Amino acid sequence: MELQDVNVDDASDRGQAQESASADVDELTERAAAMQLESAPSPMPRSPGLRLQIPNPFEPSDQPVMDELMQTVSPVSSGQRVAAAPALPQPPRFEGRTMQDRRNFMRRYETYLTAINALQTQWGGAFAMPVGACIESRTKRMVARYEFNTAPHLITEEQWIGY
């Protein structure tokens, strides 16, 4: 292997190298700036007098806003309007495993269904939750797998009631 002697201390060589490196950096900077300008999206043309105005909804208004009279949605125009509905009873959740747990759940479900049916009127009423929707998801999967031998979504409402 041959070794070459290189004079590193030559000040003039270093100065020229630094100048050429500086020139290379400046040239690269100019090229990058030109490329960015070429790739930048062109600004949207605007009319000089056009200005987008977005109102501030929290700004106090100078004029008070008056309430408007609206039509009633009551079935009878002379009838009373419903101002508040009673709190709907919550459906029970089945999480048991024994026959006694099933019986207790069905008793609670029948009580729930009676309360929901009492709220039914000719103009509308409360939605009664199906039995299948009242069964806790892990319990539903276990029962579907071991009792019905099928997927939980394939079991009908009648099958859940019969269970």
Image: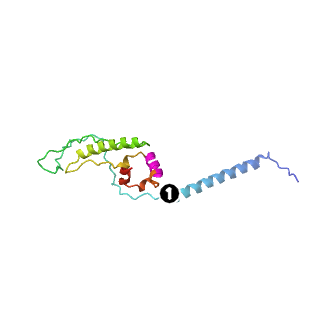
Task: Find residue 65 and report its horizontal and vertical position in percent.
Answer: 21, 43
Can see residue 30?
Answer: yes
Residue 59 falls inside the magenta stretch: no
**Residue 45 placement, left or right of 146:** left
Q: Residue furthest right?
A: 1
Number of marks drawn: 1
Dot 1 crowding, Cα within 10 Å, few <14, some 14–19, many 20+: few
Side (left or right) of 80 relative to 155: left
Q: Residue furthest front?
A: 99
Closer to us: 33 or 151: 151
State the residue in front, 142 or 13. 142
* Secondary structure predominantly adopted by residues drawn in magenta: helix
Percent from the top left, x then y, of residue 94? Answer: 39, 43
| Magenta-tinted stretch | 137-146
Q: Secondary structure at mark 1?
A: loop
Image location (x, y in percent) of residue 114: 26, 44
Q: Which amino acid does the dot numbered 1 rest on?
A: Ala
Task: Name the residue located 29 percent from the left edge and 45 percent from the top edge.
Answer: 113
For the question of whether residue 57 can be seen, the reply is no
Residue 142 among magenta residues: yes
Residue bearing the label numbered 1: 40
Residue positioned 42% across, 54% down in the render: 153
Relative side of 116 to 135, left or right: left
Q: Nearer the viewer, residue 65 or 160?
A: 160
Task: Residue 155: name its quadrant.
Answer: bottom left
Point out the residue furthest to the left here: 78
Colour scheme used in the picture? rainbow
Identified at 60% across, 53% down, the residue is 29
Taking the image as shown, residue 24 lies to the left or right of residue 75, namely right
Residue 39 location (% of width, % of height): 52, 59
Residue drawn at (38%, 53%), measured in percent from left and top?
Answer: 159
